[in-house]
């Protein structure tokens, strides 16, 4: 029985150094996310923007959610919270009070995501879950400020319920997105990538290179579908685990690098690339250490000495004495420690079962789905997730926005093109009209009839921003127009149709 247990736990053993690398990568992505979001503090998170707090609470809120960012409609308050999130992310990167900083980063990430759900995409769910499971992982045990002065672990191999949850979560991302791809374009015709690259709103130069080759796009459609469906199985093979791990990481890096070159998906590809770093086997980490450690040594003897004695010789005695007193005061019996460990493991396993059920309820028979009365926990701790990337089918509707402003002298200016004269001609690059992926996602949600409540707030926000610049001619009206194109088979496109989504006018003086 012990031999069988040893075999079964192999797929869930991870290297502590790889977990530290995962922690650092997640922290870097957090900082990038904070940096991108901070360019739209007023627009996306204040009452002067596109989603004022009363509108959020009326249309995009459940009684189980929480958000520190929803405590105020002032952009200045948002700025303070963003600075706090950035400080926590830096501390997480350095491994300073790692568990506390993981918790703080998770709370602030959930908070900002709850403040404006209209700009979220699948990568946000994954980033949130990496922090959630990271709280239970020892990803600050090595390569961290917390580990300074502590002896190295007896072994770098580590397995627990949290590592099981981490591996299963990665597999769920790809299994569920594949199983949700149920349309003929994915499973029969192989035309999903053709339709994806027909979407000018997300098309990048790499996608333009592939687009003229239907046979290649069909082959890549099959490769995408079966990679997502089959490759995660290798994570559970208990033999030659390091080899299968390297295969998974290598394929995923190539997969998401290809996505980043062809489709405008924001941080989605970086989040996914960061997420698999914790799978790197010990042999890969040994290889990295052999090449990176000499680089640190070349920084100079003074820096090397500081790395070898991180706390400084003057503090060693004091620190040791304080630690001895604390450990003596709070020393737990072996039985108490075992009880705490078992409680933590049971909690993580229960949460993992809940997450698996949440994921499966969209692909199983309705009677097996999670009941609405049980979903409150997922909304509260934000383990709710949906991996429907280009699923069940790829959008056929495409197009571009015209923000048609009419001046007091009767001129028509397009605010989406820096106030140039309005034209119905398609821009050379539709994707270039979006400042970042958050605005692209917002514009996508803006189209849905169920989200029609959000349209006037965007229109009035645009008017206000325009009139804040004294060099701009005053407008007496603004119309948000969508030039809709429908992608058809065989490189055909239905002619654009003009849809006026919203109109607004400045308030009377």
Image (tube, rainbow, N blue to C red):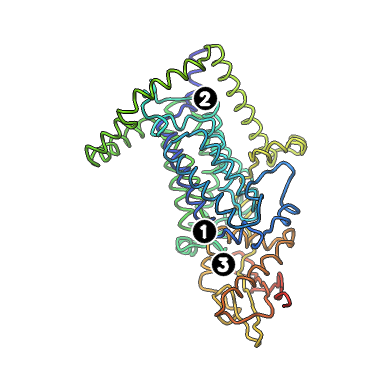
- Residues at circles 2 and 3 in contact by the CB criterion of under 8 Å: no
Residue 186 placement (x, y as % from top left): 60, 51
Which residue is drawn at the image coordinates 42% and 22% (left, top)? 322
Residue 20 placement (x, y as % from top left): 43, 35
Residue at the spot of label 3 = 491
* Observer-nearest of 205 and 474: 474
Image quadrant occupied by the C terminus: bottom right
Q: Nearer the viewer, mark 2 or mark 3?
A: 2
Q: Residues within 10 Å of mark 2 (few under 14, many from 20)?
A: many
Residue 407 placement (x, y as % from top left): 64, 83
Q: Is residue 73 above or below residue 105?
A: below
Earlier sequence position, callout 2 versus callout 3? 2
Q: Is residue 286 left or right of residue 181?
A: left
Earlier sequence position, callout 3 versus callout 1? 1
Tell me the tag on residue 264.
Answer: 1
Residue 347 placement (x, y as % from top left): 62, 26
Dot 3 falls on a residue whose secondary structure is: loop
* Observer-nearest of 67 and 349: 67
Q: Residue furthest bottom?
A: 409
* Observer-nearest of 234 and 52: 52
Earlier sequence position, callout 2 versus callout 1? 2
- Residues at circles 3 and 1 in contact by the CB criterion of under 8 Å: no
Which residue is drawn at the image coordinates 55% and 37% (left, top)? 103
Q: Quadrant of residue 37?
A: bottom right
Q: Quadrant of residue 79?
A: bottom right
Residue at the spot of label 2 = 160
Q: Is residue 379 above or below residue 77?
A: above
Q: Nearer the viewer, mark 2 or mark 1?
A: 2
């Amino acid at each position: 029985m012990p031999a069988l247990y040893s075999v079964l736990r192999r797929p869930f053993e991870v290297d502590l150094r790889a977990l530290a690398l995962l922690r650092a990568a997640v922290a870097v992505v957090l900082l990038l996310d904070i940096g991108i979001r901070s360019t739209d503090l007023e627009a996306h998170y204040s009452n002067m923007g596109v989603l004022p707090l009363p509108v959020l609470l009326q249309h995009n809120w459940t009684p189980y959610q929480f958000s520190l960012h929803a405590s105020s409609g002032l952009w200045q308050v948002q700025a303070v919270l963003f600075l706090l999130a950035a400080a926590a992310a830096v501390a997480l990167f350095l491994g300073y009070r790692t568990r506390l900083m993981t918790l703080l980063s998770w709370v602030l990430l959930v908070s900002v995501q709850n403040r404006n759900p209209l700009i979220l995409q699948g990568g946000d769910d994954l980033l949130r879950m990496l922090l959630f499971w990271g709280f239970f992982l020892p990803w600050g045990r090595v390569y961290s400020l917390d580990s300074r002065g502590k002896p190295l672990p007896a072994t770098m191999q580590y397995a627990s319920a949290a590592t099981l949850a981490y591996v299963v979560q990665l597999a769920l991302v790809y299994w569920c997105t594949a199983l949700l791809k149920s349309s003929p374009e994915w499973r029969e015709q192989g035309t999903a990538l053709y339709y994806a690259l027909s979407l000018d709103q997300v098309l990048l130069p790499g996608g333009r290179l592939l687009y003229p080759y239907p046979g290649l796009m069909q082959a890549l459609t099959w490769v995408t579908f079966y990679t997502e469906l089959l490759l995660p199985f290798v994570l559970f093979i208990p033999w030659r685990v390091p080899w299968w791990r390297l295969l998974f990481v290598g394929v995923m890096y190539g997969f998401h690098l290809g996505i980043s070159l062809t489709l405008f998906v924001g941080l989605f590809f970086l989040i996914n690339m960061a997420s698999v770093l914790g799978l790197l086997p010990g042999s890969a980490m040994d290889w990295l250490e052999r090449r990176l450690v000499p680089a640190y040594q070349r920084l100079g003897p003074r820096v090397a000495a500081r790395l070898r004695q991180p706390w400084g010789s003057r503090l060693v005695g004091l620190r040791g004495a304080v630690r001895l007193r604390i450990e003596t005061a709070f020393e737990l019996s072996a039985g108490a420690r075992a009880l705490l460990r078992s409680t933590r493991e049971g909690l993580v396993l229960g949460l993992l079962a809940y997450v698996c059920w949440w994921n499966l309820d969209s692909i199983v028979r309705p009677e097996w789905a999670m009941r609405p009365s049980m979903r409150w926990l997922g909304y509260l701790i934000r383990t709710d997730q949906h991996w429907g990337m280009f699923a069940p089918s790829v959008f056929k509707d495409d197009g571009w926005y015209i923000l048609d402003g009419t001046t007091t002298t009767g001129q028509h200016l397009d605010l989406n093109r820096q106030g140039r004269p309005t034209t119905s001609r398609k821009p050379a690059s539709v994707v270039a009209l979006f400042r970042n992926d958050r605005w692209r996602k917002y514009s996508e949600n803006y189209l849905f009839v169920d989200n029609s409540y959000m349209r006037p707030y965007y229109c009035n926000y645009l008017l206000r921003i325009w009139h804040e610049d004294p060099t701009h001619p005053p407008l007496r009206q603004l119309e948000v127009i969508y030039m809709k194109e429908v992608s058809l088979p065989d490189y055909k496109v239905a002619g654009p149709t003009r849809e006026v989504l919203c109109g607004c006018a400045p308030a009377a003086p």
